[in-house]
């Protein structure tokens, strides 16, 4: 199984800050990586797919980058509504299985 | 609009089975995967498996392989997830989601399954 490691586990930042979350895969996954935002009591919401493709309707302050084993989600200017937990998720094109990272909780200072 | 309506909360005893349903509307059911993801209280997301309703093909996570069965009824656009031999660690919110091969862009509201003696 491919393992996904996210860092940090928790992040506290101020409104307007640039925030970066990292996700590392235990082996190369090309660009088969997605990012989700989840707020308490709600289902996850897809933000980014194929490492860097922004889902329609998602604010442009969210961006994704990376390939192979290292990926980042960047929020260019943190907003109060961005307080949530963020998960990366990989797709293994060989086994056709998914794996989620353990999550990063983003808090507003 | 795309909707995924899940069945209601369940309370089960250890060793029992549970079946959660997920009725889809607003999109061609056979053109997408239905993926199942669970989340234990206060924990992260865990992928369980998916089904291609078009041909019934499935794929399961190794952790639940042998205990889980995902099926789809194309006549009613409903997917089902059955989990057997329940243990307390199976207590979680179970989500269905409309997916492409690599990610899920529409999610159901979740179904809480509680396993307790």
Image (cartoon, rainbow, N blue to C red):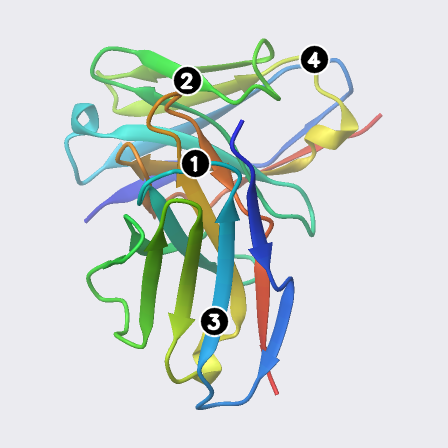
Residue B59: image tag: 2
In this picture, residue B39 sits left or right of residue A35: right
Residue B85 versus residue A2 in the image, above or below? above
Disc 2 to disc 4, C-alpha distance? 19 Å
Pinpoint residue B47: horizontal percent, then vertical percent.
Answer: 50, 33
Q: Secondary structure at mark 2?
A: strand
Label 1 close to label 2 by CB (< 8 Å): no
Q: Nearer the viewer, mark 1 or mark 4?
A: 4
For the residue pair B12 and A10, the one nearer the viewer reads as: A10
In this picture, residue A82 sits left or right of residue A109: left
Disc 1 to disc 3, C-alpha distance? 34 Å
Q: Which residue is mark 4?
A: B85
Q: Residues within 10 Å of mark 3 (few under 14, many from 20)?
A: some
Q: Nearer the viewer, mark 2 or mark 3?
A: 3
Q: Which residue is mark 1?
A: B6
Q: Residue at the location (33% across, 41% down)? A: A32
- Chain ID for label 3? A
Q: Which residue is mark 3?
A: A20
For the residue pair B110 and A18, the one nearer the viewer reads as: A18
For marks 2 and 4, the one nearer the N-term is 2
- Image quarter where the C terminus of chain B lies is top right
Asked if badge 3 and badge 4 are on a common chain, one would say no
Q: Residue at the location (52% across, 22% down)? A: B61
């Amino acid at each position: 199984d491919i393992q996904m490691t996210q860092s940090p586990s928790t992040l506290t930042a101020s409104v307007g800050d640039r925030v970066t979350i990292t996700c590392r895969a235990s082996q190369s996954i090309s660009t088969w990586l997605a990012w989700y935002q989840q707020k308490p009591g709600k289902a996850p919401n897809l933000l980014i797919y194929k490492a860097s493709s922004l889902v329609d309707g998602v604010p442009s302050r969210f961006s994704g980058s990376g390939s192979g084993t290292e990926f980042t989600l960047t929020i260019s200017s943190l907003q109060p509504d961005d307080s949530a937990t963020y998960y990366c998720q990989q797709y293994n094109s060989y086994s056709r299985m998914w794996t989620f990272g353990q999550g990063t909780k983003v808090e507003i200072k | 609009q795309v909707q995924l309506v899940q069945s209601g909360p369940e309370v089960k005893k250890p060793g029992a089975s549970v079946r959660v349903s997920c009725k889809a509307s607003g999109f061609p059911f056979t053109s997408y995967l239905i993926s199942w993801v669970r989340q234990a209280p206060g924990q992260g997301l865990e992928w369980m498996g998916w089904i291609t309703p078009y041909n019934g093909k499935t794929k399961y996570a190794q952790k639940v392989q042998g205990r889980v069965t995902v099926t789809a009824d194309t006549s009613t656009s409903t997917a089902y997830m059955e989990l057997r031999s329940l243990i307390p660690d199976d207590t979680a919110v179970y989500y269905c989601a409309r997916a492409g091969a690599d990610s899920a862009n529409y999610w159901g509201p979740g179904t809480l399954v509680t396993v307790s003696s």
